[in-house]
Image (cartoon, helix red, strand yellow):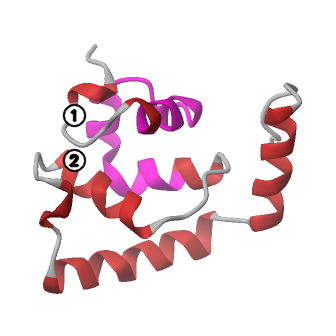
Amino acid sequence: MAKLTTIRNIGPAFEESLIAAGINTAEELREMGADTAYTKLLENGSRPHFIGYYVLHMALQGRPWNDCKGEEKKALRKRFDEIKAQSFDEDRSAFERMLNQIGVGTFER
């Protein structure tokens, strides 16, 4: 099983976020794909950020993070907005961050 950082564009901080969301290996990430992985990140309390979303797509394609342009970027933006609307709850995320800061873990629905 390969570390997440073996995938282009995924550094230690991104790896830490993925692991916190239950994605532990490069193989798991590749198998689930960018949309499912990003949904898990949001559901785990990560703040939505479009650049992080498309960087994940580029990473899984082995492309430089800044290779996303034009119509491809517009399509990814539309999908990002859909995922964000379905998976991100500002109040829940703030509550989960507070629980994690005091060391009692992630709030479960």
Judge left or right: residue 3 versus residue 46: left
Amino acid type, label 1: Ile
Asked which quadrant contains residue 30, the reply is: top left
Pinpoint residue 41: horizontal percent, then vertical percent. Answer: 54, 48
Q: Is residue 92 visible?
A: yes
- Part of the protein shown in magenta: 14-39
Say whether residue 17 is magenta. Answer: yes
Pinpoint residue 43: horizontal percent, then vertical percent. Answer: 64, 52
Amino acid type, label 2: Ala
Judge left or right: residue 98 versus residue 4: right
What number of labels is visible?
Answer: 2
Taking depth in this image into account, of 67 and 91 the one nearest to the observer is 67
Asked which quadrant contains residue 53, the reply is: bottom left
Placement of the N terminus among the 4 image quadrants: top left
Residue ID at (40%, 29%): 12
Pinpoint residue 78: horizontal percent, then vertical percent. Answer: 38, 83
